Image (spheres, rainbow, N blue to C red):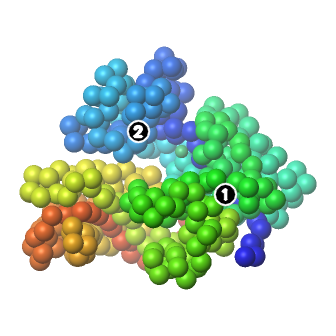
Amino acid sequence: MQATLQKIIHVDMDCFYAAIEIRDNPSLAGKPVAVGGLSPRSVLCTCNYEARKYGVHSAMPTTKAYRLCPDLIVLPVEMAKYKAASQRIQQIFHEFTDLVEPLSLDEAYLDVTDSPHFNGSATLIAKAIQARIFAVENLTASAGVAPNKFLAKIASAWQKPNGLFVIRPHEIAEFIKVLPVEKLHGVGRVTAQKLHALGFKTCADLQTQSLIKLTNRFGKLGQTLYEQCHGVDHRIVNPHRERKSVSVENTFNYDLKNPAEHEQAIIELHQKLAYRLQTINEVRPIKNQFVKIKFNDFTTVSAETKSGESNLDSYQKLFLEAYTKIRKPIRLLGLGVSFSKALLTNDFQQQELFVN
Ligand SMILES: [Mg+2]
């Protein structure tokens, strides 16, 4: 398989929101700190490494986090502050290339294939970006350098925090062989379980399968799995990517069977979506809200309504509308919003405001 080689850097801020809070209040250093909702049913956005030692992680219900770590300091979300820091960090990226694709406030892909900086050394550019971010923001970032997007993203997580990991073209084959399948783009917890059950633990295991076998078994994902297990990813860094929708979903360990469980799940997903929406910093207005339900017999239903916001009551109504059609135990629940199309000219104006 022929791979298109690019020089991609994936930069990911370390525990971004928590790191900003600790930077601004040094007495928090060394203590377990999280940022998130404080109400009984809300979830955490981010936590630092001290908190992670207790098993606390992002998207965990705050009450559960307190049970695991009673000394946890949970701070309220100060989104305006995080957005301001994010914009300054984006400007640093643009000092090195205009091909920047932000994934959220704290993460971006950069294509430096044709960058004139450091004689085109992506590794030195990544180091310089980390140093600039630290000098300007007093925050650490981890960076991954690789010939494509999915490997760059894996690389940035390889030596977190404050890490730099490089996968050179000639190292891909060795690196990929031992890579666990759950690290692949598009493989969530449930797909990972399915792959494990079939005996596919690493990319080397997947490499034994033909493209046809994988697409027969996994549909569209089969093609992605086939390419990725050979170290290939043709996606380009797209600075003008338009997001059509944002959604969150949960596949439950046990099927949900009663209204109280349904309600709790909807509330938690609504919170999670609220944080996602703040994080992605989308400028276009919301057009629709939708709900997706997958029952234990794998029947899937959905419902959608026109809406200018992500409203909890509307999700509950949509849920009932969809649920009533089948009324079986629920395996998966998803909530989301879609955005109205902004005029292209507006997009460019936004882009320019952002860069300058
Ligand atoms: Mg991060």
- State yes or no: Cβ of the residue under disc 1 lies below 8 Å from any atom of ligand 1: no
The residue under the point 54% across, 27% down is 23
Q: Badge 1: few (under 14), some or many (20 or more) residues near its Cα, within 10 Å? A: some
Q: Which residue is mark 1?
A: 177
Check if mark 2's residue and mark 1's residue have beta carbons within 8 Å.
no
User: In the image, what residue occupies the spot 15% across and 64% down?
Assistant: 329
Residue at screen point 31% across, 57% down:
250
Q: Can residue 44 be seen? A: yes
Describe the element under mark 1 as helix, strand or loop. helix
Residue for badge 2: 57
| Residue 222 horizontal side relative to residue 32, left or right | right
Residue 129 visible within the image? no
Q: Nearer the viewer, residue 30 or 232?
A: 232
Label 2 sits on a secondary structure element that is loop
* Label 2 crowd bin: few (<14), some (14–19), many (20+), radius 10 Å: many
**Residue at 66% in and 50% down:** 155
Amino acid of disc 2: His
Q: Mark 2 and mark 1: span between their CA atoms?
A: 29 Å
Q: Is residue 333 above or below residue 83?
A: below
Residue 190 horizontal/vertical position (percent): 38, 60
